[in-house]
Amino acid sequence: MSVTQALKIYTEPLDITELSFLHDKAGKEKKQYYKVYSMLMVLSFIIPFAGAWYRATDGSPNAFSPLKFFTTASILLGISTAGTWLSYRISLRKVRLDLMERVKVIEVNHITRKQYMPQTNTYYFYIESPTRLSIEVTQADFYRLHEGDEVSIEYAMHSKLYLGYF
């Protein structure tokens, strides 16, 4: 990041609609984590049980060993817990930090390229931001602004969730 670009970044408090957006996002992600983790917990017990039945059909003498079952289930539960915790640390925790701090980043950028996508009837500006490659804009802004013009983007400080442009 160049020195001139670093001077074009500042912070402001989040407004009520942006806080609502982040709160809804956090709520949806939390529900998704619970759903996925509960499914992984059930699978952590079904997989060892299915393995025991498979060993029983092969004629293994101690196919339904409680030690094997609980060892395998514990390992799978540990893997599921670690994966869910890591996923939380990477995404949902950052959204929660944004909700606690209530600050957004405003970054002033220059338009490097304009592009119309006829397949979806959408308009894009490519910008020089380190956090976003492009932003979708309205048709009016697409024709009003030109390459080299300044456009400011807003995003949440920690999660880098895009909030809009002006």
Image (tube, helix red, strand yellow):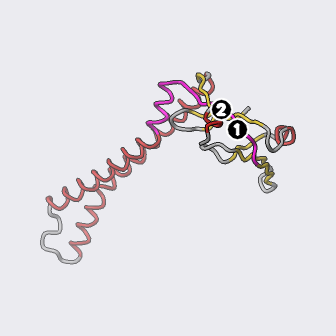
Horizontal and vertical percent for residue 20? 58, 27
Q: Earlier in the sequence, mark 2 or mark 1?
A: 2
* Label 2 SS: loop
From the top left corner, tell me how far across and down residue 72 is, in percent. Answer: 23, 59
Left or right: 37, with 126 as reference point: left
Relative to 93, say whether 86 is above or below.
Answer: below
Q: Is residue 155 above or below residue 103?
A: below
Q: Position of residue 55 (x, y in %)?
A: 22, 72
What is the tally of numbered marks visible in this picture? 2
Mark 2 lies on residue: 8
Which amino acid, mark 2? Lys
Q: Is residue 80 above or below residue 30?
A: below
Question: x, y (%) of residue 60?
Answer: 16, 75
State which quadrant residue 105 falls in: top right
Q: Tag on residue 109?
A: 1
Q: Are marks 2 and 1 in contact (CB under 8 Å)?
A: yes
Q: Quadrant of the N terminus?
A: top right
Closer-to-camera residue (142/108):
108
Q: CA distance from mark 2 to mark 1?
A: 8 Å
Q: Is residue 145 left or right of residue 36?
A: right
Q: Give amino acid for label 1.
A: Asn
State which region is magenta. 92-112
Q: Nearer the viewer, residue 6 or 136?
A: 6
Name the foreground residue: 30 vs 88: 88
